[in-house]
Image: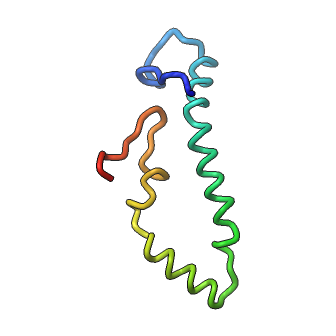
Amino acid sequence: MSPPAPAGLAAPTDEPTGTRLACYESLRIPRTAEIQRGSRGNAGVLHLPDGPAQRRRDAQMAVHAALRDRTTLYAHETGRSVVPSGV
């Protein structure tokens, strides 16, 4: 489990820079690992040659194209959720 986030990682403090960077890193690693897993999983899907498989993929992607389907990717601030409740 990550250590609790300081009140604000950018707020003035007497904490050593290394301590603050370690906290920031502990907050970022789980999310960046998830993003990387998703990217690696998409590698084969996003590089299909033209044809039936590519058209099926395009149709599926069109259904899920809304940004609201990607809130975990784009609505993020290290240390806290910025996704509105109910989304």
Above or below, comparing residue 50 to residue 20 in the picture: below
- Outermost residue, top side: 14
Quadrant assignment, res 85: top left
Task: Name the one closer to the observer, 47 or 85.
Answer: 85
Q: Position of residue 66 (x, y in %)?
A: 40, 67
In the image, is 6 to the left or to the right of 31? Answer: left
Number of numbered discs: 0
Quadrant assignment, res 15: top right
Q: Position of residue 39 (x, y in %)?
A: 64, 59
- Outermost residue, bottom side: 51
Q: Residue at x 62, y 90 (%)?
A: 52
In the image, is 22 to the left or to the right of 66? Answer: right
In the image, is 57 to the left or to the right of 4? Answer: right
Q: Residue at x 41, y 21 (%)?
A: 7
Q: Which colour style is shown?
A: rainbow
- Locate the N terminus by quadrant: top right
In the image, is 27 to the left or to the right of 45? Answer: left
Quadrant assignment, res 26: top right
Q: Residue at x 50, y 77 (%)?
A: 60
Q: Position of residue 47 (x, y in %)?
A: 68, 75
Above or below, comparing residue 81 to residue 73 in the picture: above
Q: Position of residue 79 (x, y in %)?
A: 46, 32
Q: Residue at x 46, y 50 (%)?
A: 72
Task: Name the one closer to the observer, 20 or 3.
Answer: 3
Above or below, comparing residue 16 to residue 36 in the picture: above
